[in-house]
Image (spheres, rainbow, N blue to C red):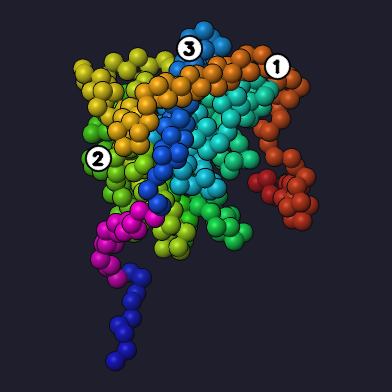
Amino acid sequence: MTAPVRHDHDVQPAPKDRLLLVKDPLAPVSTDDLLALHRKMMLLRRVEELAAKAYTQRKIRGFCHLYIGQESVAVGAAAATADDYWITSYRDHGHAMAKGTSPRAVMAELFGRSTGASGGQGGSMHIFDKSVRFMGGYGIVGGHVPLANGVAWAARARGEDRVCVCFFGDGAANQGAFFEALCLAALYKLPVVFICENNWYAMGTPLHRQSAITDMSLRARGVGMTREQLDGWDVEHVRQRVAAARQHALSGAGPVLLEIVTYRYRGHSMSDPAKYRPKGELAQQQKGRDPIQLTARRLQADHGITEQSLAQTKADVDAVAQDAWDFALHSPEPDPATLYDHVYAPQQTSLAADTDLGQTPSKNQDA
Ligand SMILES: Cc1ncc(C[n+]2csc(CCOP(=O)(O)OP(=O)(O)O)c2C)c(N)n1
Ligand SMILES: [Mg+2]
């Protein structure tokens, strides 16, 4: 008996819910590794506390979105994807440092100095560091999600054993480009790990007022993508589940959407006093679920680390952050002659030389 012919217009059953089944692929974290994760989270926080101070002193201008409270997500993810590509939104200082960009290069970028990661021409929202495969922060909500597909496509085409990790917010998961990118990524089984950092708010709008469903990982279901929702306050747990998602995506089984639930302590940006939060919500989060406190308690209880040693780590981190401030402050501003650099790609690329691209369009092409 031959199989029934399937016509494209036949009604198909809804895609099955594909949950991420890969078990924790990494060995449990050692004391040294946990100390390193703890230190990195503290560094992200301290650099951003200084950035907030610099902003109020008008040393940093323009937009400035802080990542304070969410550190366990980027730091845990970095421990599982050290050699992979990353791309993110405007809330990018923590991501860049977690991926390996130096605090000096981040702070100098915030100060608009030529020694910054993007030569001082990007600022807070546009840190970029190819040397650590950090493919940038982007200001258009959801706009970078399709770019993640391109990065992953290129990595696969070159035969690299790498995924693209794409971070975005709960608000971005309601944007059109996000849906289109998810659809194509699933269709082409691209090696992307999409990470929705659900920090409960998009600017001042709480999640339940942006979306009829509040489990954002369900966005994967309609396109047949594998998904998982997890709490993001425990850096060790984030590390394990991002490693699982990476393994799945690299196996050829297709991309994964991880929704990692977290919380931001500051306003949306430096100009937002965050008056929309219910009373007591922030204090409750800081007291019960702070990722840095959680790791500190674990280091003491399960790894025999003393309070004195943790205090020393804090002093070391404070010094590194202060050094970044001093470096930024004493760095030169970009040369005005470079103002228009990097706005457009150079016209004469090898591609342009081989094709019609880059040639002046004829009158007919103009029409
Ligand atoms: C296409 C687009 N629409 C609106 C904005 C204005 N805007 C900037 S951030 C933001 C909220 C995004 O929230 P979310 O995705 O949850 O990220 P979070 O800021 O919480 O990290 C909005 C609406 C924008 N930058 N781009
Ligand atoms: Mg949000």
Q: CA distance from mark 3 to mark 1?
A: 20 Å
> Tag 3: residue type?
Lys
Would you call the spot at circle 1 few (<14 residues within 10 Å), some (14-19), or many (20 or more)? some
Figure check: 51 above or below 4: above
Q: Residue at x 24, y 40 (%)?
A: 214
Looking at the image, which is closer to me, 308 or 21?
308
- Residue identifier under label 1: 332
Q: CA distance from mark 2 to mark 3?
A: 34 Å
Q: Is residue 198 visible?
A: no
Image quadrant where one finds the N terminus: bottom left
Q: Residue at x 52, y 38 (%)?
A: 99
Q: Kindly report the secondary structure that dominates the magenta region of the rendered protein.
A: loop
Task: Return the x and y of residue 289 as percentages of the image width and height.
Answer: 28, 29
- Residue identifier under label 3: 53
Task: Return the x and y of residue 246 as percentages of the image width and height.
Answer: 44, 53
Q: Residue at x 48, y 12 (%)?
A: 53
Q: Quadrant of residue 189?
A: bottom left
Name which of mark 2 and mark 3 comes first in the sequence: 3
Residues shaded magenta: 10-25
Would you call the spot at circle 3 few (<14 residues within 10 Å), some (14-19), or many (20 or more)? few
Q: CA distance from mark 1 to mark 2?
A: 46 Å
> Tag 1: residue type?
Pro
Name which of mark 3 and mark 1 comes first in the sequence: 3
In contact (CB < 8 Å): disc 3 and disc 1: no
Task: Return the x and y of residue 194 as percentages of the image width and height.
Answer: 41, 47
Looking at the image, which is closer to me, 41 or 366?
41
Figure check: 215 above or below 13: above
